[in-house]
Image: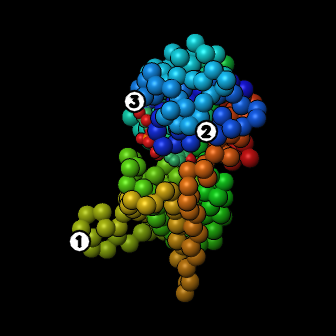
Amino acid sequence: MRVGVVGAAGRMGAEVCRAVDGSDDLDLIAAVDPSASGRALEEVTGARGGDDGVTIAGGLDALVDAGVQVAVEFTGPGSVGDNLVWLLEHGIHAVVGATGLGEEELERARALAADGAANALVAPNFAIGAVLLMRFAAEAARHLPHVEVLELHHDGKVDAPSGTALRTAELIADARSDAPDVPLGDERHPGARGAEHAGVRVHSVRLPGLVAHQEVIFGGTGQTLSLRHDSLDRTSFMPGVLVACREVAGLDGLVVGLEHVL
Ligand code: NAD
């Protein structure tokens, strides 16, 4: 499988370049990132990209020129939608890790993937532990419908709440039969009770030193249940990204969630 990485010079993109380059069955043949256009990929990420080495390109055309079959997208909320549509229009399978995709963009991509030659896997979190946390949270919500989500990330993260927190809230909403009234109280400072998504309160923390963490806290009669996942390092996402690269061609259109390929 010939792989290209979009957002290759970023924190996640660079990690993906190293993981793909280090795998036996995937070839890293292209990298795109306007912030490092023209520079050797090895110098920027430590990943060479084959015997000849890859030069980082400034635009997506480089993926077509190189003959990329699967592109891994880790840019950000401002560009991921356009990039995903572009990839599908050009028949390139997409593994999308960047968060912040709008509902409209997702639906457009879904239609393109349903009609076209390329598939997409969009995952708000590629860490297996986070996927399990979301699954366990949905299970617990059937029995303990009172729940709030606390997500904690490094201070360079652009969007809030995190894509993982939004997806967790949606899975909880789907799983529980009753959405209990959430007491907001007298919120003296706006935001003190967090944001609401799918009827679930979500709280975001941004601090240097953190990577990606989430706690889901359920409350019941005389008890609480806390589920927590910690990504301590960006390598935590790489096994999931590599599985997605291997499996995306066999999917049917666009799917959301790593669980579809596990
Ligand atoms: P970052 O800012 O370090 O890197 C983003 C890179 O994308 C930058 O180098 C930037 O120059 C590049 N870029 C911007 N626009 C581009 C474009 N149009 N074409 C090509 N490259 C472009 O950010 P990060 O910490 O690496 O995170 C990237 C995204 O991944 C964020 O949305 C973040 O929330 C998400 N994320 C997802 C997961 C997951 O498991 N799905 C895990 C961690 C982070």
Colour scheme shown: rainbow
Quarter of the picture containing the N terminus is: top right
User: Residue placed farthest to the left in the image?
Assistant: 188
Q: Nearer the viewer, mark 2 or mark 1?
A: 2
Viewed as shown, does residue 9 lie left or right of 112?
Answer: left
- Tell me: is circle 2 under 8 Å from ligand 1: no
Of the image marks 3 and 1, the number of the one nearer the N terminus: 3
Residue that badge 1 annotates:
188
Check if mark 3's residue and mark 1's residue have beta carbons within 8 Å. no
Circle 1: residue type:
Arg
- Residue 31 in view in this figure: yes
Question: 10 Å neighbourhood of mark 2: few (<14), some, or many (≥20)?
Answer: many
Q: Residue at x 61, y 57 (%)?
A: 130
Q: Position of residue 165 (x, y in %)?
A: 50, 55
Q: Is mark 3 within 8 Å of ligand 1?
A: yes
Mark 2 vs 1: CB contact within 8 A: no
145 on left or right of 131: left
Q: Amino acid at mark 2?
A: Arg
Q: Real-space Cα distance between discs 3 and 1?
A: 42 Å
> Is 230 above or below relative to 77?
below
Q: Earlier in the sequence, mark 2 or mark 1?
A: 2
Q: Residue at x 66, y 25 (%)?
A: 50
Which residue was labeled with disc 2? 18
Mark 3 lies on residue: 35
Disc 3 packing (10 Å; few <14; some 14–19; many ≥20): some
| Residue 59: image location, x then y, percent | 46, 20
The structure residue drawn at horizontal position 56% and vertical position 37%, both measured from the top left corner, is: 46
